[in-house]
Amino acid sequence: MLAAMDQSDMQIDREKQKQEAHFRNLMKRVAQSHDRQAFAVFFDHFAPRLKSFMMRKNVSAELAEDLVQDAMIAVWRKAGLYEPSKGSVTTWVFTIARNLRIDRIRRDVHMPMTELGTYDEPSDAPEGEELLGRKQEDGLVAQALKSIPDEQRQVLLLSFVEDMPQSEIAQKLAIPLGTVKSRMRLAYGHLRRILETRS
Amino acid sequence: MKPAHHLDDSTVLSFAAGTLDDAFSVVAEAHLSMCPACRAAVREAEALGGEVLDALEEGSVSDACRAKTIAALDQATLYRLPVAPPRSDLPPALVRLLDISSFEDIAWKKKAPGVAMCDVKLPAYAKGKLKLLRISAGRAMPEHGHGGEEITLVLKGAYHDHMGVFARGDVADLDEDIEHQPVVGPGEDCICLVATEKPTRFKSLAARLMQPFVGI
């Protein structure tokens, strides 16, 4: 837990930094020169993870691969819009895949997910937001995820991977809705504290 | 003015995970369009999603999928940001759904003296209900609990209850067991966007009594 986590535990994750720098470089090549080779490297890293992400109950392997294909093509089309200050490349890919999963599974043209960035004005970016991408590269978010209790991590995985609303999680785990919410609040509070120690 | 009352952390996480029901998602997005602090919070929560994706086991992707994706790049046009809708006092998330551009265009239905409502139609798969609520200046609502999940966003005017003053941009993202008695300030009507669960589930007596009154 955080209290027991001294400076040595908070060490920068060099591997992660290297990986992010590599991804950012690939993104730049895709955005600036439509570099197919860079895209292929990107595909080989992300497609297998996206396949797992898309495969859940009621989703066939065919549909999952369709969604992987759509997500990767969206990466190609949107590469120029990626902003490192707002989060890591992996997080950006996650948001693309998440929005696609919502749109394709709900299939509704009236309510596409809006990109959060459309609401940003340069003047009102809160202090610290610009640093999120850097902190994530340093492995702080990954560390937060590793250092929370299993029961909190389980709730996060059911949300982010299994795409389950809070009420379904409560049902599946046979716990009150309030407990699902409080586990989410604790997990998020933990992440916040870790990010703040490095601001 | 930046909002003073924010989304609950559990709502932030569920929004980032993409699992909020549409009614709640629209209210959350409307608040986000007015609240830089909650946008930053959602980004942090999305970063968790990124790490989760990064740590997922690798599924097997067929060669056909890879080949098809790469072949499709030829036809893929570069993405262009959609043209921003004209500036409006209504949040973009609501403008999209209602196809109106100002408070004057809302088709109100009177529900009780000083209370008017407008249902916002959602796609059939949505589990919650979304409505606009207009309460006249100086009016007090009866004390009530919610008997279900509920998020309220103030779009115009202000009300106060024991948790403080809620003005434009402020969101009341309350646990279902909290009771309150909102009072609208004098001078200006208060218009709120309210997401609730459909009224079939575990309604408290207070909420049932309220039902003929506000219809939720």
Image (cartoon, coloured by chain):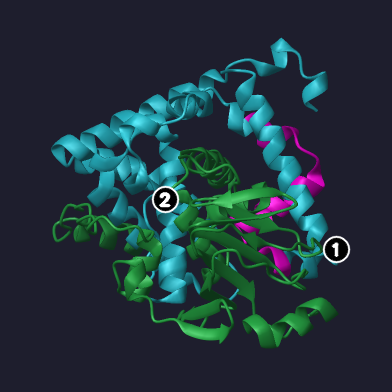
Give the quarter of the figure containing the N terminus of chain A: top right
| Disc 2 element | loop
Residue denoted by label 2: B33
| Disc 1 element | loop
Which three-letter amino acid code belongs to the residue tagged 1? Ile
Mark 2, chain letter?
B
Residue denoted by label 1: A175
Q: What stretch is highlighted in magenta?
A: A143-168
Which chain is depicted cyan? A
Name the side, left or right, on which A28 lies relative to B4.
Answer: left
Q: Which residue is drawn at 59% across and 62% down?
A: B152
Q: Which residue is drawn at 45% across and 57% down?
A: B30
Q: Residue at x 33, y 54 (%)?
A: A72
Among the 4 quarters of the image, the one containing residue B62: bottom left
Q: Which of A92 and B36 is in front in this view?
A: B36
Please name the color used to draw chain B: green
Q: How many marks?
A: 2
Mark 1, chain letter?
A
Q: Nearer the viewer, residue A86 or B177?
A: B177
Pair 2/1: label in front: 2
Q: Does the magenta portion include B193?
A: no
Q: Does the magenta portion include A158?
A: yes
On screen, residue A15 above or below A29? above
What separation in Å lies between label 2 and label 1 (alpha carbons)? 33 Å
